[in-house]
Amino acid sequence: QVQLVESGGGLVQAGGSLRLSCAASGRAFSMYAMGWFRQAPGKEREFVAAISWSGRSTYYGDSAEGRFTISRDNAKITTYLQMNMLKPDDTAVYYCAAILTSGWGTSRADDWDHWGQGTQVTVSS
């Protein structure tokens, strides 16, 4: 079992940056690929980015490509999402998620095994 706690959300102006963190606890963190999703009011949960257990492979959703960077520090059992050039459309609750490495490659929220409680990101225009 893996427990996930996000932090780093907040209010930022358009064009600004934020770095989200996801601290994990539990066993076998390195067995999991990690990801970030987001959900705006009235919308479905949207895939943002994912990173393999080793950190050597990543993939991104269309909305994040070129602006966001996912990384992880297995020694600190923490995953990060660096978000640059933020836009008002990026406003959402951001969720950290974990999936066993056998599930690597999926962007469907229903496929992911464990979730954090979410952190609010608000981008003002």
Image: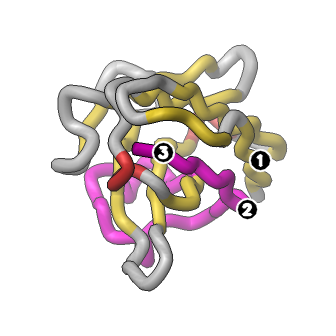
Quadrant, the N terminus: bottom right
Q: Give the amino acid at mark 3.
A: Val
Closer to the N terminus: mark 2 or mark 3? 2
Kind of element beneath mark 1: strand
Q: Are marks 3 and 1 in contact (CB under 8 Å)?
A: no
State which region is magenta: 96-125
Query: x, y percentage for residue 49?
Result: 35, 43
Q: Are marks 2 and 1 in contact (CB under 8 Å)?
A: yes
Residue 60 vertical placement versus 116 (above, below): above
Q: Give the amino acid at mark 2.
A: Gln
Query: x, y percentage for residue 19?
Result: 57, 26
Question: Residue 58 lies in what quarter of the image?
Answer: top left
Kind of element beneath mark 3: strand
- Left or right of residue 1, residue 71 in this image: left
Residue at 67% across / 58% down in the picture? 118
Instruction: Answer whether residue 99 is magenta in the image.
Output: yes
- Left or right of residue 43, residue 18 in this image: right
The residue identified by callout 1 is 5
Which residue sits furthest bottom? 42
Q: Crowding at label 2, few (<14), some or many (≥20) Cα neighbours within 10 Å?
A: some
The residue identified by callout 3 is 123
The residue identified by callout 2 is 117
Which residue sits furthest front? 125
Residue at 73% across / 62% down in the picture? 117
Between the C-alphas of marks 2 and 1, the distance is 7 Å
